[in-house]
Image (cartoon, rainbow, N blue to C red):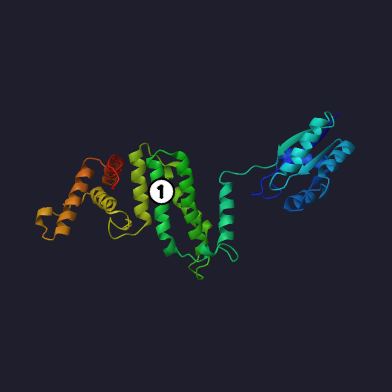
Amino acid sequence: MTARIVLLVTSPRLPAGLLTSAAWDAVRSAPVLTGVDGELTRAVRTAGAEVRVVTEGATQALLDAAAAHGGAVWLAGATGDETLARELGLRLARQPGLAELELMYGSWDPPGARLLDAVEVMDRLASPGGDPWKRAQTHRSLAAFLIEECYEAYDAISADDTDALREELGDVLLQVLLHARLAEDLPEGKSWTVDDVAGGLVDKMVRRNPHVFSGEQAGTIEEIEANWERIKRAEKTRDSVLDGIALSQPALALAAKILDRAGRVGLAVPPPLAESQVDPEARLGASLLATVAAARQAGIDPEAALRRATLAYAEAVRVAERATPPPT
């Protein structure tokens, strides 16, 4: 019978002893070798299997163990021990029948596992000995970067560029992780972590989606939105329907949001008439607000409309530039 060599690959992001039943059967039925003595090695030993650490000549050691016992298992490290796998594969290709090589996954990364890597990398960058620039930042100094990264993600969406969107969302995530890491160093009683951010988000999603998590009936999108707003109002004690609006957003978007909030509760407050304003700036502001109100009535996003027109104008400027001879 041909000997069997199993390369056992596991997720470094899961507890070391969390293996499939097939993986446990493999390590209990054949000699186990590895290149590094770590948590996985200790977990396997605790379960009753013997593990030998091999720092040199791993390929030959595996072949010898497999020949002597009919099989052997190699506990791969975090990188998968690709060099060993390649050398072993070439050796077996040159000598058919020496042994059969099998790649076995003892555990898999769960969805979102790379987020753990991102948190770990950010912790190293923002800790002593890491990146001086990141360690010198504050929530306030990073505020403009957060806005900028969100705009770049918006640009990718507007361009229907999903590859760019993936990258830009990574940059937004970087800002979230850095803010959370800096918050760990706030004074006692004010500090929080990325787990607090994620935990708060999970709790909010569960609370505000009872049609998914609690069996509440909501048949239409409108009903779901109404439930969301009802739950949100119950969670937050606010004196005005306008409370909670981000006042730092662009003025057109801000005007549209305020008009929308007022309209939701049936407040018919007419915007000021431009003709009644004496100050030129106030007159222009009133005129713009009236335009935003008209856009809302027509179901048009004024921010998007102005952006579209401005970008078209920018392209016209570029065309004109190309058509105009350079000055002599």
Q: Residue furthest front?
A: 328
* In the image, residue 141 above or below residue 163: below
On screen, residue 278 versus residue 103, left or right, reads: left
Residue placed most toward the observer, 314 or 215: 314
Residue placed most toward the observer, 127 or 312: 312
In the picture, the quarter occupied by the N terminus is top right
Q: Residue furthest right?
A: 68
* In the image, residue 233 above or below residue 220: below
Disc 1 designates what residue? 152
Looking at the picture, how far across and down is residue 139, in whole percent? 44, 63
On screen, residue 302 versus residue 94, left or right, reads: left
* Residue name at image x 75 percent, y 34 percent: 102
| Quadrant of the image occupied by residue 233 | bottom left
Looking at the picture, how far across and down is residue 263, in whole percent? 23, 48
* Residue name at image x 66 percent, y 46 percent: 11
Three-letter code, disc 1: Glu
Looking at the picture, how far across and down is residue 111, in whole percent? 57, 43
